[in-house]
Image: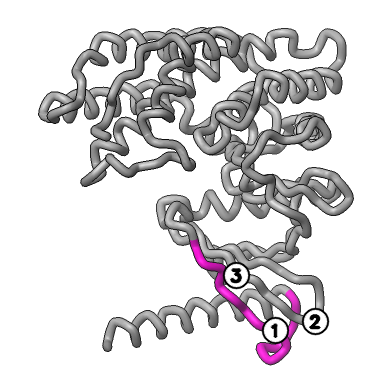
């Protein structure tokens, strides 16, 4: 039908654009290479294409969200250029916004980090890569997307909690007992934010997307990283807190894993360098835990049915229980205790 034809025409047009970028970057004729779209995930705001030709395998990353242009592809390419000498990110090949919001880079060989507790060697390798970025300094560099959006976290968190509470009032089988606790949690987040903004913080080059899916275990054992569109200057403590507490992997990182990473990272600092780092990590974790709780609660209100909803292979109420325990805790040991002793709240019907 017409819809199928339209889809095919769109796919052809997109591939033609990718082909033009590849030719501009490499000088290859269209007969010398093939372009293959990778099946996109629903959460992606970009398309990834494998480009196979007479030279190294390439990846073309096409940005689809107009609200992210031109910042996202520009940050990605500048980050790849900045990191090119250090071999911890893909090697950049081409970006020209006039040719389209497409970044071309060399494929990075290796395996995505698995969904399990990382080995000490993997955690140490990641810490060393982050130290390499820290040593780049800050002169002439740009703000990360995370730094730009940080002031909005408390505001957005409050709005999402209120949205959930209003939704819960009209639901059968959903408790409204969370209302008082939500105000307490929002205050904890606001206090953490105030303490962080009151401190003089040095910003360094950081990643803002800490998911395991963007970490590559390379054949030589080193850690590589992909997806740099949010990278830029930020507080490294924020990046560490994001790595420890992201919904995709917080349940995979044990107290030992966290200690291994922190020991490796701090071992790379001078004796008197950044003594407040652990305290800032704890404050960011408190802030981000409340934010994750609110984000998931707000998202759940928009779902037609929450009963089979899983967040990274975990029933949503179980994941929310973990973030609630995190948000109420000041240390990881306290979180582990609250995880066992807190009375669960049925946030959504089961």
In the image, residue 66 above or below residue 123 = below
Instruction: State which quadrant residue 42 falls in.
Output: bottom left
The residue singled out by tag 2 in the image is: 54
Q: Please, which colouring scheme is shown?
A: one colour
The one of 334 and 60 positioned closer to us in this rendering: 334
Q: Earlier in the sequence, mark 2 or mark 3?
A: 3
94 inside magenta stretch: no
The residue singled out by tag 1 in the image is: 33
Callout 2: 10 Å neighbours few (<14), some, many (20+)? Answer: few
Indicate the position of residue 64 as horizontal and vertical percent values.
Answer: 45, 61
The Cα–Cα distance between marks 1 and 3, rounded to whole angstroms, is 12 Å
The residue singled out by tag 3 in the image is: 49
Taking the image as shown, residue 158 lies to the left or right of residue 342, namely left
In the image, residue 92 above or below residue 265 = below
Labels 2 and 1 touching (C-beta < 8 A) = yes
| Mark drawn on residue 63 | none
In the image, residue 10 above or below residue 172 = below
The Cα–Cα distance between marks 2 and 1, rounded to whole angstroms, is 7 Å
Indicate the position of residue 232 as horizontal and vertical percent values.
Answer: 64, 38
Element marked by disc 3: strand
**First to last magenta residue range:** 26-40
Q: Residue at x 41, y 79 (%)?
A: 10
Indicate the position of residue 266 as horizontal and vertical percent values.
Answer: 80, 18
Instruction: State which quadrant residue 275 falls in.
Output: top right
Indicate the position of residue 128 as horizontal and vertical percent values.
Answer: 82, 32
Taking the image as shown, residue 263 lies to the left or right of residue 180, namely right
Q: Residue at x 17, y 30 (%)?
A: 167
Q: Residue at x 58, y 40 (%)?
A: 209
| Residue most extreme to the bottom | 31
């Amino acid at each position: 039908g017409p819809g199928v034809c339209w889809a095919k025409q769109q796919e052809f047009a997109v591939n033609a654009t990718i082909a033009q970028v590849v030719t501009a970057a490499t000088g290859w004729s269209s007969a010398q290479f093939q372009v293959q779209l990778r099946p996109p995930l629903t959460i992606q705001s970009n398309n990834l294409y494998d480009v196979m030709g007479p030279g190294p395998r390439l990846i073309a990353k096409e940005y689809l969200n107009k609200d992210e242009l031109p910042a996202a592809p520009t940050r990605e390419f500048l980050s790849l250029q900045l990191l090119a000498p250090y071999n911890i990110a893909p090697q950049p090949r081409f970006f020209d916004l006039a040719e389209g919001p497409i970044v071309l880079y060399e494929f990075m060989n290796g395996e995505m980090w698995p969904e399990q507790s990382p080995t000490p060697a993997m955690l140490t390798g990641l810490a060393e890569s982050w130290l390499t970025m820290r040593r780049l300094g800050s002169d002439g560099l740009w703000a990360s997307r995370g730094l730009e959006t940080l002031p909005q976290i408390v505001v957005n968190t409050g709005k999402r909690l209120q949205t959930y509470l209003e939704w819960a009032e009209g639901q059968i089988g959903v408790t409204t007992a969370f209302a008082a606790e939500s105000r307490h949690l929002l205050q904890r987040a606001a206090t953490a934010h105030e303490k962080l903004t009151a401190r003089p913080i040095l910003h360094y080059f950081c990643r803002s997307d800490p998911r395991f899916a963007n970490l590559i275990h390379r054949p030589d054992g080193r850690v590589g990283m992909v997806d740099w569109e949010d990278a830029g200057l930020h507080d490294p403590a924020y990046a560490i807190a994001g790595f420890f507490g992201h919904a995709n992997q917080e349940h995979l990182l044990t107290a030992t894993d966290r200690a291994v990473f922190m020991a490796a990272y701090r071992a790379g600092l001078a004796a008197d360098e950044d003594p407040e780092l652990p305290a800032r990590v704890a404050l960011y974790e408190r802030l981000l835990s409340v934010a994750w709780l609110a984000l998931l609660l707000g998202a759940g209100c928009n779902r037609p049915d929450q009963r089979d909803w899983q967040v990274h292979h975990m029933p949503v109420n179980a994941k929310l229980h973990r973030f609630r325990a995190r948000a109420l805790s000041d240390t990881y040991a306290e979180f582990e205790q609250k995880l066992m002793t807190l009375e669960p709240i049925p946030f959504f019907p089961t």
